[in-house]
Image (tube, helix red, strand yellow):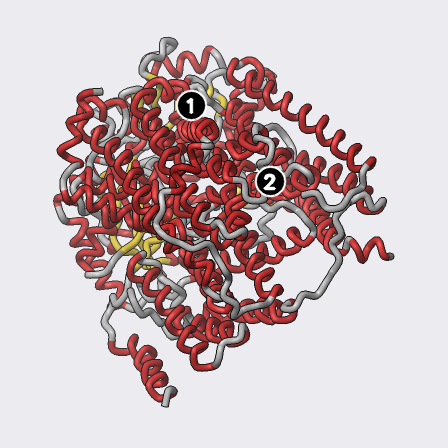
């Protein structure tokens, strides 16, 4: 069991990578088959090359799992908690919330809130955090909206400041 | 002390749409192909239209899924007139026919038609095996499946007209798809393709090295964009596709639910932009013919195209069978 | 060639010079912003150039192209964010170098290498344009397949020490490139019915996620948000000129690799940067540890990706066939201004071709001056406490990625790959192979299938054509080399199970 704990990240990523050929084989046999694109010559077969890549990846993954199981990998990668791991997870959660809210709230509402909160949890005092959030998000919006003509998400309130 | 001005500012921002007049910000034109010569044509119109409206109209290239990705993206945006569909025939009419899109041309409110571009068959200038359309066809007939050609992307409009020509003259050539015509022309000039279908934009930049053997349209103006080259019908080939059907064209559109006043403003601006002679000259010089159809002619023009495209789809199916039968 | 001198008066006037300088500044800024690269820069500024006289307008667009190709290196070095995929190779050594307190040297080197690489590319453009253009025409699908395979195989070299993990990461990249609409059947492949995936995940969203977002997570994890990092004292200096003299062979080789890849339409700066990095690594001198802040690594990557600019202009101007995405839009700009590129342009408007060429050369020189002056300013970024920097970098990543195609979906892609990048780094996987695989995947597959369609005797087409046969032979040799050295390395590891070596 120690073997697994020492290589926890390595095993996680192995599982992640193992999903890739699995998805390729599965989708080739189902979705591409239904679309009539999983057999025939170079023109018709959209599954030929994916299957080759998936086969090579399977071989490499098999090799790697043997190495992992025999503990041939020289570098340990245990799950370990750093000083800020919890904070980083909180920040990541906030970012997920931001992405969920962005299409509805619009850039000019969601972004100052996100950046102020980020400033705050990274240790700045409330007032500078709010001010920093406003300056940062509106400053960047100015560059993108008025100088580069990008239309930022306007949200349900149709908010656009600089374009 | 800090909160009050903030609330005031927020209130101001929220109130803005209520009293502002359209357009109060930049407008996007969602263009369905990769950047290149054809996008330049849309840019010319967008630029002129932006001047009429007093805002920037930017052309956003959103390629993918044979043009339908751009439509999907634009459909996700609100129906407020700030998003224009660059309604190319492929995503607008063709893909729905193929069952690859769930809309029809009737689901949109038309602005003005933009430009049309006809297709043509080109060969290398120094080609020795054939020099014109009849000798090309004769060679293809004598050597079935031996010649290699590209219509750019497969199953698109250029592929349909090409397959139709081959079917009508009962000749078979190996089709080799490329992501864009712009990419395929290099391999025609490099000698690995024997002929191909081109559009005027690509022809203009390569005209020193390629020769047009037949223009794939019955319209006289189409031949003019290829320096007066002969049309297929001049060789007695009936394409079976009339008017706009065998051509690439685009009609700028907005979502159906867009407010009437906004649509009126957009139509007015686009009409004025297209009426400018310098805009027309610029488009013509690039090989794109301004169509000049107004919003009220939309149904009359676009409706019949759908019927004609069916025969193009049948031609591609025929070509696939024919190619399988000549394979050893 | 002398007719081209007619371009001199067209270029050397206040408006054209100002437009070019502005273009360089805009290009550098756009390149520094994560997500936006030279292509987006040119697309975004096209409407402005449209209203200038031809040479001023083209000068500005070309300047954005040059500046944008170099600007990405700054954020790669300072923040571990390659502003563009083409700067991803610069990050390997640039970031460690900056972390060791040599930020200004790294930025200075990157700028100097970019400029000199660009100028070498320009000289090739001037003298060998017709020759290289003709050669480029002989590259057809079989040759592209061989070249793409070469690029994929370099993954094993770039990620030496963990070739197995590198190849797995490359496999992930190849798999990502498969997502979308198949070019031959129009079938939707691995899209799971989501139209946002109908042209695959955007490579820039993946790059920003893998590199920048994962780095932000690491930064928050390690704490110390209000500390002021101690960095090398920064002032305007010409030290980089002295440093680069030590790398002259590497510089010229990398610039030529870049120019060559630029001249072959369809392979761009990103690939050439990785390949010249791999070449420099293979030929490195003892004492240079690549991946830990070797100057040569920065020189190789930057000289190649700016040499590529000159290269990509060769087929654009002399054949009318754009060398990459950016030159395709440049060509669009030229058409909008009323000139059709191609051999005819050289005959009918030599002054325009000449003006463009001069704009390209002068643009490079302006960039060097600006780069030297601005390097201390850029370097100062590292002294900003993390509490300020982290939100700023996050927002820059969000805006830059969103601006690509006005898509919130791309932000989710960025987030997902931020997580993937974090896990991969924790498990000691190299990240760059994902990008190489993703860029080359489509070139590899589609040209393989296209070659088979062109061929009448199946795979024989790959060995019947001389250039293709030569490239395939190199591929096979490289493959044998990689297999042999991997087996040797793992034998050595078994004998000596020492601690962490890379």
Is A133 above or below relative to C7? below
Name the image quarter holding the C terminus of chain C: top right
Name the image quarter holding the N terminus of chain C: top left
Q: Residue at left 32%, top 77%?
A: B13
Q: Nearer the viewer, residue C475 or C322?
A: C475
Comparing labels 1 and 2, the label whose residue is closer to the camera: 2
Q: Are marks 1 and 2 in contact (CB under 8 Å)?
A: no
Q: Residue at left 35%, top 81%?
A: B10
Q: Picture quarter containing residue A83? A: bottom right
Is C347 above or below relative to C316? above
Whole-number angstrom distance, CA of label 1 to CA of label 2: 25 Å
Outermost residue toward the right in this view: A1
Query: Can you see residue B198?
Result: no
Residue C417 lies left or right of residue A24; in this view the side is left
Graded by Cα atoms within 10 Å as few (under 14), some (14 to 19) or many (20 or more), the crowding at tag 1 reads many
Is A126 above or below relative to C406? below
- Disc 1 is attached to a residue of which chain? B
Q: Residue at left 48%, top 33%?
A: C272
Name the residue tied to disc 1: B187
Name the residue tied to disc 2: C174
């Amino acid at each position: 069991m120690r073997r697994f704990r020492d290589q926890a990240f390595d095993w996680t990523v192995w599982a992640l990578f193992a999903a890739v050929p699995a998805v390729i084989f599965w989708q080739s046999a189902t979705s591409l088959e239904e679309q009539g694109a999983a057999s025939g010559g170079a023109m018709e077969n959209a599954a030929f090359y994916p299957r080759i890549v998936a086969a090579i990846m399977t071989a490499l993954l098999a090799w790697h799992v043997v190495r992992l199981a025999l503990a041939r990998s020289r570098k340990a990668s245990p799950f370990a908690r750093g000083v800020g791991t919890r904070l980083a997870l909180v920040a990541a959660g906030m970012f997920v919330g931001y992405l969920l809210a962005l299409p509805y709230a619009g850039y000019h509402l969601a972004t100052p809130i996100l950046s102020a909160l980020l400033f705050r949890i990274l240790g700045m005092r409330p007032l500078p955090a709010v001010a920093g959030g406003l300056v940062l998000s509106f400053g960047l919006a100015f560059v993108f909206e008025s100088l580069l003509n990008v239309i930022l998400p306007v949200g349900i309130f149709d908010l656009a400041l600089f374009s | 002390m800090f909160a009050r001005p903030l609330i005031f500012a927020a209130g101001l921002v929220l109130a803005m749409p209520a009293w502002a007049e359209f357009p109060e910000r930049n407008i996007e034109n969602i263009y369905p192909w990769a950047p290149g010569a054809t996008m330049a044509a849309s840019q010319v119109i967008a630029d002129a239209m932006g001047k009429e409206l007093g805002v920037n109209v930017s052309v956003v290239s959103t390629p993918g899924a044979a043009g339908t990705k751009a439509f999907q993206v634009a459909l996700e945006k609100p129906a407020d007139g700030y998003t224009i569909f660059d309604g190319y025939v492929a995503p607008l009419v063709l893909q729905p026919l193929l069952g690859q899109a769930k809309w029809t041309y009737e689901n949109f409110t038309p602005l003005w038609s933009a430009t049309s571009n006809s297709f043509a068959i080109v060969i290398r200038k120094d080609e020795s095996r054939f020099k014109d359309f009849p000798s090309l066809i004769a060679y293809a007939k004598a050597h079935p499946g031996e010649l290699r050609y590209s219509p750019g992307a497969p199953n698109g409009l250029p592929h349909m007209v090409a397959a139709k020509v081959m079917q009508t003259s009962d000749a078979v050539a190996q089709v080799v798809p490329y992501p864009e015509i712009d990419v395929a022309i290099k391999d025609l000039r490099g000698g690995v393709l024997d002929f191909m279908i081109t559009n005027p934009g690509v022809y203009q930049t390569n005209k020193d090295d390629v020769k047009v053997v037949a223009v794939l349209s019955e319209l006289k103006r189409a031949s003019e964009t290829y320096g007066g080259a002969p049309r297929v019908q001049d060789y007695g080939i009936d394409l079976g596709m009339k008017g706009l059907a065998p051509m690439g064209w685009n009609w700028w559109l907005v979502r159906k639910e867009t407010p009437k006043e906004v649509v009126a403003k957009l139509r007015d601006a686009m009409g004025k932009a297209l009426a400018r002679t310098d805009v027309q000259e610029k488009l013509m010089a690039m090989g794109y013919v301004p169509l000049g159809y107004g919003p009220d002619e939309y149904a009359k023009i676009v409706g019949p195209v759908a019927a004609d495209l069916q025969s193009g789809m049948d031609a591609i199916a025929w070509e696939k069978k024919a190619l399988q039968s000549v394979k050893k | 060639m002398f007719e081209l001198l007619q371009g001199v008066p067209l270029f050397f006037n206040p408006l054209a010079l100002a437009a070019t300088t502005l273009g360089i500044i805009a290009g550098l800024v756009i390149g520094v912003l994560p997500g936006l690269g030279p292509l987006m820069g040119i697309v975004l500024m096209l409407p402005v150039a449209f209203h200038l006289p031809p040479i001023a307008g083209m000068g500005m667009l070309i300047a954005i192209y040059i500046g944008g190709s170099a600007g990405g290196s700054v954020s790669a070095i300072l923040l571990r964010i390659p502003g563009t995929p083409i700067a991803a190779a610069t990050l390997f050594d640039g970031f460690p170098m900056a972390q060791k307190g040599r930020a200004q040297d790294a930025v200075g080197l990157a700028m100097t290498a970019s400029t000199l690489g660009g100028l070498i590319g320009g000289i090739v453009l001037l003298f060998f344009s017709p020759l290289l253009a003709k050669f480029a025409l002989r590259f057809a699908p079989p040759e592209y397949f061989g070249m793409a395979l070469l690029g994929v195989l370099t993954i094993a070299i770039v990620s030496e020490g963990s070739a197995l993990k590198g190849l797995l990461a490359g496999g992930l990249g190849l798999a990502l490139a498969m997502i979308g609409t198949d070019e031959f059947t129009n079938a939707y492949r691995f899209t799971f019915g989501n139209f946002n995936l109908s042209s695959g995940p955007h490579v820039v969203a993946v790059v920003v996620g893998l590199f920048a977002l994962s780095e932000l997570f690491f930064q928050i994890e390690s704490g110390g948000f209000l500390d002021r990092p101690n960095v090398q004292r920064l002032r305007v200096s010409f030290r980089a000129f002295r440093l680069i003299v030590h790398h002259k062979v590497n510089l010229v080789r990398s610039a030529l690799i870049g120019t060559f890849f630029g001249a072959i339409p369809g392979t761009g700066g990103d690939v050439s940067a990785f390949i010249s990095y791999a070449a420099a690594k293979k030929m490195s001198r003892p004492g240079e540890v690549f991946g830990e802040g070797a100057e040569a690594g920065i020189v190789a990557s930057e000289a190649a990706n700016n040499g590529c600019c000159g290269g990509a202009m060769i087929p654009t101007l002399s054949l009318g066939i754009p060398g990459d995405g950016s030159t395709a839009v440049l060509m669009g700009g030229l058409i909008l201004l009323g000139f059709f590129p191609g051999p005819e342009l050289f005959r009918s408007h030599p002054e325009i071709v000449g003006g463009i060429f001069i704009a390209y050369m002068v643009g490079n020189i302006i960039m060097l001056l600006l780069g030297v002056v601005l390097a201390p300013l850029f370097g100062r970024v590292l002294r900003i406490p993390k509490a300020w920097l982290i939100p700023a970098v996050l927002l820059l990543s969000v805006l830059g990625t969103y601006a690509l195609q006005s898509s919130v979906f791309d932000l989710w892609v960025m987030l997902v790959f931020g997580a993937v990048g974090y896990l991969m780094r924790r498990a000691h996987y190299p990240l760059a192979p994902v990008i190489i695989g993703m860029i080359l995947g489509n070139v590899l597959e589609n040209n393989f299938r296209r070659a088979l369609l062109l061929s009448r005797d199946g795979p024989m087409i790959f060995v019947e054509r001389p250039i293709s046969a030569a490239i395939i032979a190199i591929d096979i040799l490289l493959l044998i080399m990689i297999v042999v050295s991997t087996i040797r390395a793992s034998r050595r590891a078994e004998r000596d199970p020492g601690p962490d070596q890379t």
